[in-house]
Amino acid sequence: MSETPRLQLLKSAYRWYYFNRSSVIEEPFEISKREFGFKDFSGSMIRHMQFRNRGELLAYIIRNVPRSIYSSVAYYKDPTAPMDIKGWEGSDLVFDLDMKDVSEAARENTFWVCGICGEIGAGKGPPACPKCGSQSIIETEWVCDKCMADVKAATALLVSVLTERFGFSNRDITVYFSGDHGFHVHVNSREIITLSQRERAEIIDYLTLNGYDSKRFEANTPNTSLLYDRAVERVAIDPNVTMDIKRVFRLPGSLHDESGITKCRCDDVQECDPLTSCVMLPDEPTKVRVIYAPRFYIKGTWYGPFKQEDVTLPLSAAVYLLAKGLADPLK
Ligand SMILES: [Zn+2]
């Protein structure tokens, strides 16, 4: 199947990035023990790849231009072997904080657009467009100031609990903007690599207050829909990510598939402006037809709202919409 103009433009932007910005990519510790996975622009995923060093990894990325790049949190004897005989030697401890798990605002920001007729609706997408019957429905969780502030606060809370309660040093903890909807926290400490799933579950229970006195939690939380409360310090991590010791996780320095924004370091999570500092695509003017986009912020500038409009945007802002399926390139 030939690539659509949308995928062609996306791929050329990703190609530019990996050719010109490969220094931003952070290879994991002990790279040769990691399983790598890649998603291409047709949506297929390959896994069980191994690279002996950074040079081999970068050469593969520049040659193949993946849409998403993942590496295992685990260390294996043989990363290329089938899952059950890889020979697990340990896993990093990682946390995923997503706007939708943290912020009421994020849940209200979901909308859908019909890819054929442009019909729009709030909330989750219907199976078929009520106007034209098309099943090409694009569902999007839009990023707003409020949900960004909420997920930053939740991430800062996790970091403070990890340092103050668990005794990790700030040196052991790296915070990354995921590239789209939240933050990833990586704990790089020798002591945690061999933690079992049960021990990781205990950490999760502590952070999420699972099994703690729920009366106290409710009493302290007038709005029970709030997912955490500073008084009792419930941290809204995604438990599945931390529990899964064989997961492949987005590689730091790679582009997010649904935004074209880099998964990049945010050393001071409360102060950072990831929608500026992690946007590393160039600003060349790019003409697109926008199906629909609420107002959005990229690299210090607000754009939109747009509805069935032809506009010229910096490539980084155009890719943000193209990657979400909300725009198409114009000649
Ligand atoms: Zn439609």
Image: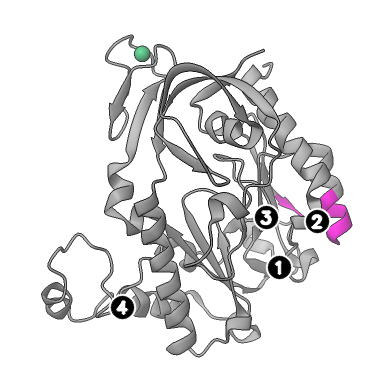
Residue 116 versus residue 83: which sits nearer the camera? 116
Looking at the rendering, which quadrant does residue 291 occupy? top left
Q: Disc 4 marks which residue? A: 233
Which secondary structure, mark 4? loop
User: Residue furthest toward the front?
Assistant: 301
Quote the CA–CA distance across marks 2 and 4.
37 Å
Mark 1 / mark 4, whichever is N-terminal: 1
Residue 56 in sight here: yes
Residue, disc 1: 76
The crowd level at tag 3 (other Cα within 10 Å; few <14, some 14-19, many 20+) is few
Q: Are marks 3 and 2 in contact (CB under 8 Å)?
A: no
Q: CA distance from mark 3 to mark 2?
A: 31 Å
Say the numbered circle drawn on residue 82.
Answer: 3
Closer to us: 288 or 61 = 288
- Pinpoint residue 103: horizontal percent, then vertical percent: 31, 56
Left or right: 77 with respect to 262?
right
* Residue under pointer 2: 23
Q: Is mark 1 within 8 Å of ligand 1?
A: no
User: Tag 2 or tag 3, which sits nearer the N-term?
Assistant: 2
In this view, the mark in front (3 or 2): 2
- Tell me how far mark 1 sits from mark 4, CA to CA: 35 Å
Horizontally, residue 245 falls left or right of residue 238, namely right
The magenta region covers 48-58
- Quarter containing the N terminus: top right
- Report, in whole angstroms, how far the alpha carbon at label 3 lies from the one at label 4: 40 Å
Of marks 2 and 4, which one's residue comes earlier in the chain?
Answer: 2
